[in-house]
Amino acid sequence: MANHKSALKRHRQSLKARERNRMMKTRVKNAMKAVRTAIESQDQDAVTAALKAATTVLDKAASKKVVHWRTAARKISRLSLAANKI
C-alpha cells in the first residue's frame, strides 16, 4: 500500500476510475445484447431503437477511452450489418 499522501490520493483516483470503467463496459455489453435480442425477435422498430442506443453508448465509451475507438467502430459496424439483414 502507498505511504505518501500523493500516492494515497492516486490510489483513490484509480479505484474511482476502475469503477467508472467497469460500469461503462457493462453498459456497452448490455446495449449490444439488446440489439442482438431485438434482431432475434425480428422486430424492425426495436432493432432500430436498440442500434441507435448501442451506437451512442459505444461512441461515448470510445470517447472516454474505455474501449479503443476502432473496437467501438468495429462493433457498431457488425451490429449494423446484422440489423440490416432482417
Image (tube, helix red, strand yellow):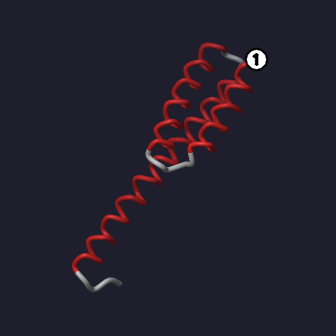
Q: Where is residue 8 in the image (x, y as percent from the top left)?
A: 27, 76
Q: Position of residue 43 (x, y in %)?
A: 67, 16
- The quarter of the picture where the C terminus appears is top right
Q: Which residue lies furthest to the right in this view?
A: 85
Residue identifier under label 1: 86
- The quarter of the picture where the N terminus appears is bottom left
Question: Which residue type does callout 1 highlight?
Answer: Ile
Element type at marker 1?
loop
**Local crowd size for mark 1, using a 10 Å CA cut-off: few (<14), some (14–19), many (≥20):** few
Q: 73 or 42: nearer the eye?
A: 73
Residue drawn at 63 percent across, 20 percent down: 47
The answer to whether 74 is drawn above or below residue 68 in the figure is above
Q: Which residue lies furthest to the front in this view?
A: 70
Q: Where is residue 67 in the image (x, y as percent from the top left)?
A: 54, 48
Q: Where is residue 79 in the image (x, y as percent from the top left)?
A: 68, 30
Residue drawn at 52 percent across, 48 percent down: 25
Q: 37 or 79: nearer the eye?
A: 79
Q: 62 or 17: nearer the eye?
A: 62
Q: Is residue 39 left or right of residue 30?
A: right
The answer to whether 3 is drawn above or below residue 16 in the figure is below
- Please tell me in which quadrant of the rendered image residue 3 appears: bottom left
Residue drawn at 33 percent across, 72 percent down: 11
